[in-house]
Image (spheres, coloured by chain):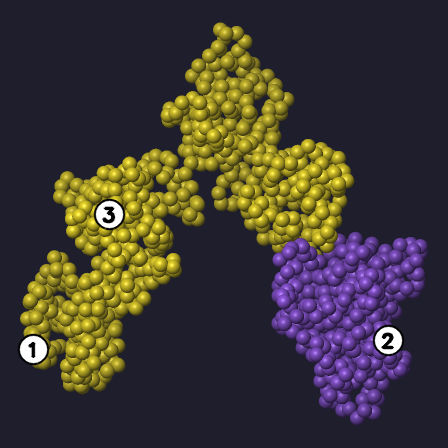
Amino acid sequence: MTARIQTFPLGNADTLRLDLANDRKILIDFADMRGEDDDDKRCDLPAELRRDLKKSGRDNFDAVCITHTDRDHCKGFADFFWLDHAKAYQGEGRIRIDELWVPAAAILEENLKDDARVVRAEARHRLREGRGIRIFSYPDRLKSWMDKEGLDYESRKNLIVDAGQLVPGYSIDGPERAEFFVHCPFAWRQDENNTVVRNEDSIVMHVTFVEGNRQSRLLLASDVDHETLSQIVQTSRKHHNEHRLCWDVMKLPHHCSYRSLGPERGENETAPVSDVKWLFEDARKEGSFIVSPSYPIPEKGADDDNDQPPHRQAAKYHRRISDECDGEFRVTMEHPSKAIPKPFAYKITVLGVAYEVVAPMVSGEASSTPLRAG
Amino acid sequence: MDIDAWLSRHGPAVGEGILESPVAAAFVSFVRRYAEDVVDLIEVRVAEDRQFVVLDFQTGRPQHSECDIRRVERIGVCFLAEDGMPFIFMLRPDFPDTEHQQLTIEGSPRAICIDDRPWGEARLTWTHAELVQRILSWFSRAIRGELHDARQPIDPVLSGSPLNFLIPRNMLIGADERDLVGVYENNHQRTLRVLPIQAHQGGLDNMDPVSVVAYQVAPECMTRMMFAPNNLASLGEVLEVRGIDLFKDLRNRLSEWVKEGKGAAWRLNALFVIIVEMPIISPSGERQDGTDLRAYVTEKSAGDLAVALGVAFPSRSAKEGSEVGYVPAVVSTDSSDAIRNLVVRVAEVHYEFDRTTATQLTGRSEEDLRRVVMVGAGAIGSHVSDCLVREGRFSWTVVDDDFLLPHNLARHTGRSADVTKNKAELVANKLNAIYDNRPSIANAIGANLFSGEPERSLIDESLLEADIVLDASASVPVGRFLSDHDATARRASIFFTPSGDGAVLLIEPSDRSCKLRDLEAQYLALVAADDRLSDHLSNPKQSFAYTGACRAITNMIAESRVLVLSGLVSSALGDAIDQSSGTITIWSVQNDGVINAISSVPKPVITATWNNWSVSIDQSVVNQIMKMRSEHLPNETGGVLLGVVDIPSKRVHIVLAASAPPGSEETPSGFVRGTCGVREHLDQVSELTGGQVRYVGEWHSHPQRAGTQPSNVDLVQIDWLATLFEMEALPALMVIAGDQDVSVIFAGINISMIDDKSSVGVV
């Protein structure tokens, strides 16, 4: 089957579903943002995910990656998933997670509430059990925590993935025809800081898909800022891994925040710092796509033209550079219209990545909707 | 080209509410409600006879594409006032040339073909959603390089003429020297059948004078058409770059006609049509199969054209050129404006049906001119030959002395008026009438295959010259006669079963290593041995005595069944004749329409002759005997032999060797064949094969290293067999199997070795 990248209109929040060539399904973040209000234009994420799983006749994801435990990346986690660590999360209809991917910070951070706390509890439980988990990075504090817990490192080191490594179990030569290269978090920086900086210690990954003999690449930049992005660029250069930064699809960091480009917002257009400029302009392939997981881009002077992302100046930059390379810039809450945003997807084809256009047909609708008769 | 200027010719951009065409209005409403993921509505335009909906269409193009399709293409969906398929224009001046596009006139944007169904059919299921789906699908295929049809159709509504011309292929050559007419049916004036005036037998009221000049663009000069010419000047330009100087040629020809005067009056006053045959070229410049044949209709007479080209003047007085209407111009004048103003409309041209078209339409590339002698012009022969001629096959000689009687019409290609005609002549005439042109492709010999002179030499000559001899006589003696004839042609036999529920095709391998006779025997063996064929030769359920005489009985086989089976036979015969291996194929149709086909490859045959008798045994029977022998070692084993006997020809063909019946005594030193069930087995085979496979002798095996010479016990047995068979004046056969081979023994008769593996014993 064709591999796909599925997006969801969730406001300023992240969730992507990757459908791999061998039907493996990987969720990158889970943020069920929709409120009670009928006018809320954000999609009903659990319903969307369940419908897709049902179509595939399954009730699990092969992997769920929580890039960091901010609310806009894990809201609703405790309600949607079957969790191993407590009976309270094991009711009927919950979706199982074969492998949970979290940054080390998600295990170590203290004073958490709500879903972040539940993610931590589940991750800790799985790490104790020694299965169904991948921890990204191995800072000293994780070592101390494991020592304190009496967990043997040697028997669990296969669960740890460091920056600069591929996530085990996925290969462009395997049936999934995809692999995940980890750029972030950096263990050394966590050691220097000695406190958790969630956004900057989050998971940044580069996915390579293969269809036919063509590679297509997706950069998942979670919520990192321009400094972390620059750090990633410099580290990749140092290790001759620049090709792991080339991209055909970019999941924009931090909902189109100018902070992910440079320190200054700019009057009309944000200017990126040089390493970030390289990432967005030189590492970008012809005809490539930027997805901004955010609310619509505000007009200048409008109420929503404020400090919160998305920033119109950043969007202006992204639009301009997209136009220059026959690329596209698409906002999750703007497509197909701001009035009725809908989930959209990209297909990985032998001719590169394509925006998935589906002609409206009665048969298409009917065949993807269960019909009930009484 | 200037898209905006072109669009503005289709009326002003208006509000959606003003759309008059209900189809266009409904489409806009559909787009608004359901298709905003795929399209953006840009504007609508309303002209007198058409309404335009302009859209930006998401093509779903990936990062790379086989051709220059953009992520978003502006398209114009054109709804005509009169009910019809909407046209899809690509509103980008540099939209690429691809397959599956219509040829539009110069100055129009490109138009894509999204639906090749006729509108009358498409409209039954046509929806707006399907329109969007088809456009999207066209883009997807273009992007992946999966559009394949390089033809460039011209829709009559866009720029064409409603006329259709039918013309024999060979008439295009020298068409300008003939006086032609376009004949039409009274109620169908759009389809003109072009004939020489001499060939037209009707009156003047259903024909128009037509004058045709034809050109053929040489393949090496052909480049792909970019637009359809819509006036004589642009046609001239199109031809000029493809190696044809249209105006020079027309001036020459037309001035000759004008000078010829009275003799060319017909042509000068006829509707002038230029027919151009062009090779089909793909967008990438590759030559495709087939040619593109189009007529450019001027709506003027040839004489008017001569005037426009400056080589003639209209005659002014009654005296000068009164019968012609035109007089030659002494000096030809510049005429470029006049030519540009001469509108040409593109019309469809169809060649009359001939062998070339028949071959192409069947999907074959080579014309099949092989000579076939078909013996028998009854139900199967008339249908199968009709079918094969429509598929472009063969030159035919039909042999039959029978006459068409009324009851034959139940399953024959003849008509009521043909009753009493000789079937061979009737069928040959019908075959000739399928193709338009001469020379004829079929002739008849209205004589019995076994006739004496003078027909004898005619029949023999035909058989000797044939490439294929086809027995369609449903007669065993005819099949065997043809098998034995000196002709070198490959033989085939086709027949229906008596019940009409089955049909059979026997075809020899091309090297004739297995002859029609052998195939007949192997076919009967198959019928005797295969459970699926237990009803194959059963007697017809009902028969009909058509004169009251008891031999004049015809079977009750329905024409519908005859058509089904003839179709199967024709198709398999056509396929088999193009390959070197032979086949025995048997079809059975059940009452619910299910068809079973059983095929068998002809098996090698070993034949020995002595005196006037010859005996054949299939290698597969020998193998079967050897297998039974080794399964029973160290004991001997044996059983009865069954075969086909032809007494007049003195031939026996052994087709089956039965295993030892229950109650047989099998020991290392001897074998006694039991009797239990033997009679029943022989009766059953006889019944299954319509009495054609019968008991012909016995076989048994010898122990290891014992050889295949008959023992003393065997000799006694052979003696008994010989005596027994004397009753029917037949030879008795005994087969003895040893370590390596078998001996075939004629009772009391010593005959020669048949090959190094199998030998014939001496008694």
Query: Which quadrant of the structure image shows residue A16?
Result: bottom right
Q: Secondary structure at mark 1?
A: helix
Q: Which residue is mark 1?
A: B716
Relative to A360, B577 lies left or right? left
Mark sitting on residue B375: 3
Q: Are the residues tagged 2 and 3 within 8 Å (C-beta)?
A: no
| Crowding near the residue tagged with mark 2, few <14, some 14–19, many ≥20 C-alpha atoms within 10 Å | some
Query: Chain under label 2?
Result: A
Tell me which chain appears purple: A
Does the image show residue B93? no
Query: Which quadrant of the structure image shows residue B23?
Result: top right
Q: Colour of chain B?
A: yellow
Mark 2 residue type: Arg
Q: Which residue is mark 2?
A: A198
Q: Residue at x 22, y 41 (%)?
A: B403
How far is disc 2 from disc 3 in space, using C-alphas?
Answer: 94 Å
How far is disc 1 from disc 3 in space, using C-alphas?
Answer: 48 Å
Query: Chain under label 3?
Result: B
In this orientation, which residue lies closer to the viewer: A157 or A366? Answer: A366
